Each structure stands twice: as structure tokens, then as C-alpha cells.
Amino acid sequence: MGRTTKPRFAIGVLILSLGLAPLFAAPTVAQETDLHFISELPDGSNMEGEPLEVGLDTWWKRHDTAYQPGIYEIVDDPVNEGSAHSLHLAIDAGVADPEDHARVISYFQAAERPDLREFFESGLGYTLYVDEATNVNASTQLVVEVFYGWDGDSPRFTTLSLMPGANGLELDQWQTFDWSGDTVTLSTAAGATDSLDNWLTQIYEQASEDKDTYPDDALDPVAIGVGLNLGADAGVTVSSYVDQVTIGDQTYKFGEDPRPILTEWPEEAARGDTVTVTGKNLADVTVQLNGAGVVDATWNDEGTELSFVVPDDAALGDRYVRISNDYGQTQFILRVVAAPSPEHPGFRDVPETHLFWGEIMWLARHDITRGCNPPANDMFCPDDSITRGQMAAFLVRALDLPASDVDGFVDDGHSIFEGDLNAAKAADIFRGCNPPINDRACPDEPITRGEMAAVIVRALDLPPGEDDAFTDDDRSIFEGDINALAAADVTRGCNPPVNDQFCPDRDITRGEMAAFLFRALRDVLDESNG
């Protein structure tokens, strides 16, 4: 509604409005145009209050008086017979103030508010059981809130209430009351009872008069919400149950929560895994995985089981999975981890006893290395020197560097690693082999241990090392990079067990390269892959 409405006659009301789902549960009979209820109280409506958990739903509660009387609960096993679920409303005369009212209202979306006459002509009724009432006219009434005309500041407002006591209410039995032209109805704006036909005539006449006075503002009469009201005369004891409400061809049952409900779900799944959850109302829903968007899902006919596949590009980490339908939503946290790497068959020339077997196999599992004898690639050549072009390829795969359209070097046009060298140059990891010009990559030349240190420091942006870690690198231009690598525990030296030398000018072997990359990248890659 978005504004404070002003009834023509002041009267205190209590309003209780449904939060995440309609006041009533899923319709048992569909109609051509469903009416949708708003999902939260609008700002500026004067319907402020704190949420109150009631039965299966979340409601908002507001009283015009300071005291908050009344019982609001969905009863799965009522004290009376004839209904599996019902809404129990009660108010105690011993504690209720004379002006207290208990009201539950579900409001229609503004764009779907029906014409008032058409709303009643489509049919409106409810099934009621009253087991205690000192005044039968104060028992639970079916109510319709109405906007019409214009009073100079805002639409006129009234509540039309079906008076069960004036329409043949009997205690201790289920009765169905339907609206018709001669139904005795209370108008809260007028504070009086009359037949529905008479009230509708007065409302439409007033709206027509207002149209003449305020042609741009006056509203044609519309129903803005439907619900239940308890304690019209207040100060009386009433205990009643409502089994269902019918609006047109739709029947709304209490206690049958139409929102998705989960009972079991997994805590963790890998990319590519099928996730299955169980619960209720899981058919005809939308599934959204945070970090992947809406995902396709399947469900069984009963709506008790739902499955979806975690996309291969889903973001890793703790992600919410939100399952929603027209009535509400539920969600759970799913830890998404990387798909397990397929076991690598190993290399013929790297037995398990090899010094770098573990590091080489780690590179293979992460698809950083693919072997040294394509297309078979069943050998690694751990003692061979590694070229600068090969090193660029290793880093591009390990760091998932983006391709570059810029031709970074003049001497790599013949190399199968030209794309990798350009990507490494664009990322400022490779700078060339002929300083200060650095327009050449020397892709076929072996890379030294000192050059390798500089490349890894740039790739990981390692901080400088404070200690002089080795005795043989004082004259090397890479001494600072070597010390940074030692401080990060990426290198341990070239002369075990003493390891006080680094051998900066010696070509690095493929096995040593595997150890360097393993120590440098294992935390980064293993964390990003779950």
C-alpha cells in the first residue's frame, strides 16, 4: 500500500500479515488467474511489528493497543474432529482490552487487486468451528479490506466482515459460510452492520461521487486483502478454528505449507557431482547455486527428492544453494570442491624411488607437465635441462595465465611455445634474455637456476628475504631473488646436506624445476582446488 490509509470512522484494529508465503497454503483447485500475495509488509504502511513464528509460517504482528492478546497457531491435530489441520485463533475475555482485535490478513499485489464486485461475485467463503464464544458475533469473521474513492488525502478504506453469529452460527460443529447479497456484514468504516449488497452500493456510490470531485485520484473499489478477524466486540472469550478459505475457484488449506522444505542435504560436493536433497514441495522449483547461477534440476513426481549437477565452472568454497517456488524459498550451505584429479599413470623414467618422484607426480596430476616425449608422453626426462620456452608453458598452465595478443619477442616465431612466452611476457613474469632491450626470449636455451628464481619471485610477488642464504651468489644479479626464494622455503640449496650454495649459473633440470614449482605453488593450487 505504501501509505497510511485513513478510514472515515476511526476504529482500532490488529493486523497480522503473512511474511514469506500466503496466509493460506497451496490451492487445491487451480483457477485461470491466480491471485498472488505480497511477501513482506510495505514501508510506510503503519503495519510495523516484529516477526512471530506461528506453526509452519512466519507472520508479522501489530496491535493498536499496547496489550497483545490472542493465540495464533496452526494445529495439526485439532481438539475437534473433521479437519487434519486448522488455524486456531483465540482471545481471552479475562485479559483482553475492550478495543483489542486479532486480525490475520494476506494482501494482494497492487497490480492484481481485483474489482470489489467481481471479487465477491467470483465466490468467497470459509469453514469455521467455534468451541467457545460468550458472544457469537465476536467469533472469527472472514474479512475483506477495501480501497475506494478519495477523501482528499488518500483512498478511502474500510473492512467488510462476514458476521457468522448473525448468519446462523452454531457452536461445536464445522460450518461453511459463503458470501451472498443478503449476507449480514460489518463495515468498520461505518461501524455498523448491513447486507453485503447494501454496503457495496454505498461504496460504489461514494467512489462515483469522489470521481467527480477528484477525477485524477479517486479509485474504483478494489479488494486489497483477505483474511480473518477475531473479537469484533472485544472483551469476550472466543476460541475458534478455521479449516479452509475459498476465493473464487481456489481453496486454501491451513497447515499445508507450500514452500520448499528440506529434511536432508549433503555438506560437500565436487564439481561434476550430482547433488540430491530430500524434503517436501521440491517439484516445479528453481535452483540457484551461488557462484554458478541457476542450475538445471530434476525431481520426482511426489516432490520429495530433487537432484542437480554441480557445474564444472562452479565457484569453489562454501556456497548457498537456494531452492524457491512461487510461495517462498529455502536454502542450505554446500561446500564446493574441485573434482578429484584423475590418477596419473606415472612416467617410465621416474620410479617411486626417484628424489623428485612426489613433486613430479604432483605436477602431472595438476596438468602442469605432460611429459617430454609427445605424443606418448610416458617419460619425464628428469635429468634434462629445461628450456625457457618449456618453462613458460609450465607457468602458463600452473597459473592459468590469459593469452596475449601482443607479440612480446622477435625470436620465437618458430617456437611451439610462442603463445606461452607472450602470455608470460604480458604478465611481467618473463622479461627477455638480452637486457636492457629484452626483445628476445631465447626459447630454446636452457634456463639457469638464478633465472628460475627471478621468474618465480615475479610470478608469486614474493617479498625480499632478509638473510643472505647462500655463499655462492654474491656476484649474481639474481641474489635478491634467490634470497626471497630461500625465505619462502621454495629452494634449499644445491649441495645437500650442507645446502649453503645455490649454483645460480647452473642450468636447472626438469626434476629440480618440479621441486621448485611444487614448493612455490602447492598452497596456491591445492587451496584453489578445494
Image (cartoon, rainbow, N blue to C red):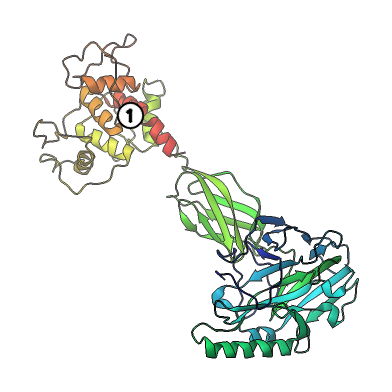
Percent position (x, y) of residue 71? Answer: 79, 60
**Residue at horizontal 21%, vertical 31%?**
387
Percent position (x, y) of residue 283? Answer: 62, 63
Q: In which quarter of the image is residue 415?
A: top left
Q: Nearer the viewer, residue 228 or 436?
A: 228
Q: Quadrant of residue 220?
A: bottom right
- Is 400 placed left or right of 310 in the picture? left
In the rendered image, the quadrant that contains the N terminus is bottom right
- Is 418 placed left or right of 183 in the picture? left
Tell me if I can see residue 349 in this picture: no
Percent position (x, y) of residue 297? Answer: 54, 59
Percent position (x, y) of residue 166? Answer: 84, 81
Q: How packed is label 1: few (under 14 Cα within 10 Å), some, or many (20 or more)?
A: many
Q: Nearer the viewer, residue 166 or 372?
A: 166
- Is 450 placed left or right of 256 in the picture? left
The residue at which mark 1 appears reads as: 517
